[in-house]
Image: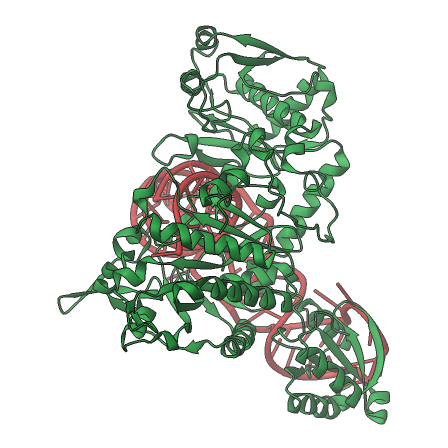
Chain colours: A green, B red
Amino acid sequence: MGSTRPTPQEYARSSAPVYDQALVSGPQPSPRRVVRAERRSPLAYLSIGVWLTIKPIESPLGEDPSMSQSATRYAESHLYRIRHSLAHILAEAVLEKFPDARIAIGPPIEDGFYYDFEFSTPPTDDDLKQIEARMKKIISGNHAFTMREVTADEARQLFANQPYKLELIDDLVNGRVDEDGEQIAAPSATLTVYTQNTFTDLCKGPHVSNTQEINPNAFSITFRPMAGAYWRGDEKRTQLTRIYGTAWQTPDELKDYLHRLEEARKRDHRVLGQQLELFLIEPLVGKGLSLWLPNGATLRDTLERWLRQKLLDAGYQPVVTPHIGSIELYKTSGHYPYYKDNQFPPMDVDGEEYMMKPMNCPHHIMIYRSSPRSYRDLPLRYAEFGTVYRYEKSGQLHGLTRVRGFTQDDAHMFVTPEQLEDEFISVVRLAQEVFNELGMNEFRARVGIRDSKKLDKYAGDDSLWIPAANAIINACEKIGIPFTVEEGEAAFYGPKLDLVFRDVLKRDWQLGTVQVDPNLPQRFDLEYTDSDGQRKRPIMIHRALFGSVERFVGILIEHFGGAFPAWLAPLQAVIIPIREDHNAYAQEVAAHLRRHGLRVKADLRDKHMRNKIKENRALLIPWLLIVGDRDVAERTVSVRLRTDEDKGALSLDDFTALATRLVAERALNIF
RNA sequence: GCCUAUGUAGCUCAGAGGCAGAGCAUUCCCUUGGUAAGGGAAAGGUCAUGGGUUCAAAUCCCAUCAUAGGCUCCA
């Protein structure tokens, strides 16, 4: 390794943790990351790593103007000023109607802006409508935005009855935060305030010069309900009321945005999960616990069998471990004290404490430890679709993407230090292969290292962490996967790489994770005998590609909008007879296709064929096979795709060959 | 967990103190129709749960549960 190689910490500083604000959009596992991205000062966007080569993918829903720009350009854009200014106008309108409201902060964010308030009685939806109407009036008043520098004392006088502003002022002069509440190092010598019309706010800008630069019909504050938000994101502090706005340059852009939201809503895996009868979450079963209906289970099972075969081919060995374990196991691993608050509480069984399994690694470690190991055995790769249970706060649960019981496509590798980098590379390559075959081509990696300010949070010392982090970074560079390095995102036992997938709507989803772990082998005193006869300590790699199968299926549902490639579709073809006397042929066709391994059904209900087409189309069945007099006579099926394309008649043999080929190839197209 | 909203038939939703409603789905009857809803009938309800106010509660009040949008956290 060359002496110029930056330390992992230097990497983290040189690559902006968020390199494209568009990449932090949409539902994703870590809302905290969104918050951090929103608050990041423009400066933080300036240093963008050269290895970040995300290419834009085509979106069927049109381009979002803010998304095609880098975050830096966004912060300098006119749209950014419009949104920032609208936040102030919102505060003005709110204070007019609620003079005793306290104002907190109001930054521009992706797609819009928000402002946080403290109300004695929160506004109603009606109030919000009136506030929006009032904002349009203020905009039409052509008011100038003027900036003024003030001393801290002047500022304290200006905001004498605004405690949140006073706190910000104190922190600003002491160098703790900037106006958006972002932590910064240097104290700020001068403070600036911006005034428009009757409203003055502590603010570093920038703003539009006059409200006439804002189109009064290109924003909305009623598009999303009000929300609670903790002051400074700290749950121990006051909960404020956040009013969100979206704002654009033109009314058409606003319309497009609202349309995109609507499209995303239609793809919601919870909506499609019900419509396509994939899964249920039943209160009587419990919060965050999913029931898989036959359709969903078929999809899941197809995915799992495919992945299992891939793992066997890659030299993984299957293992199976139970759903609960002695608390002593998790005390030894260190998980219990560290993640106590996120686990189901222990249960007492005959005076011994047991826990629902929150992770599989300690169990796999015990399998490794069950027998003396030689360097000739390594790498050892244990794989299990292991179901784990974690206590998530109730407000945190969300469909399949955030549940309390889920199955990880988990594996643990035990390697020698020399094997670490190659093994790591092969894991990431396998991930690439798996996701590419699923048609998920757009993904990147996020390397998580220790928070250099809180080193005591982590197990083990530099001698374990630094080589491990370097192995990950080396691997990323060799593979050429786009990656960023982020401080404080490591697991407590080792640095990690998270795989982040960007779906067809350009939303980011964290998928699996690959973690280098030098610590658990130490805690469990794992050993192998090396070629020189010495007992040595192996290193572990923890990895999951899908992450949680439940969550992964949820992501697939949204990515494909429920229109799965044929090989994944729970039902691949439905045969629709035109008249009742075609039923026999329909059943014959179904039996024929089933014999060729296809999942098909003959729809023999006493309904008009048009009705059956409509209903099966809504179920997004890839192939609808219409059979009538001509088809019976000529042994054909008339193929109608779920895309509404009528492909005309194919001989039964031709269709069988086509369908089985597309399924075998796991093709993304269905004709 | 916290803030706000919502909870009526399998699904989507109307009803806002005075007899529990519609469309779709389901069942049955008629219908046999070549590419996005053929006709008719029946059945389907603890109006989330528990308590309260009232002559009377799906409707008003309180609590609980669940869901949604946020906030916070995530091995």
Q: Residue at x 60, y 62 (%)?
A: A557
Q: Residue furthest left?
A: A351
Q: Residue at x 43, y 15 (%)?
A: A173
- The picture places residue A517, in percent across and down from the top left corner, at 37, 58
Q: Residue at x 79, y 75 (%)?
A: A640
* Residue A81 visible, this angle: yes
Between A392 and B19, the one lying in front of the other is: A392
Looking at the picture, does residue A349 appear above or below residue A470?
Answer: below
Q: Is residue A363 above or below residue A212?
A: below
Kindly indicate the quadrant of the structure image that contains residue A649.
bottom right
Against A342, is A540 above or below? Answer: below
Q: Position of residue A639 (x, y in %)?
A: 79, 78
Decide which of A168, A496 is in the foreground and name it: A496
Pick the front one: A403 or B30: A403
Left or right: B72, with A259 as reference point: left
| Position of A64 relative to A217 (above/below) | below
The total number of labels drawn is 0
Q: Quadrant of the C terminus of chain A?
A: bottom right
- Residue at (38% x, 34% y) in the render: A234
Q: Position of residue A301 (x, y in %)?
A: 52, 76
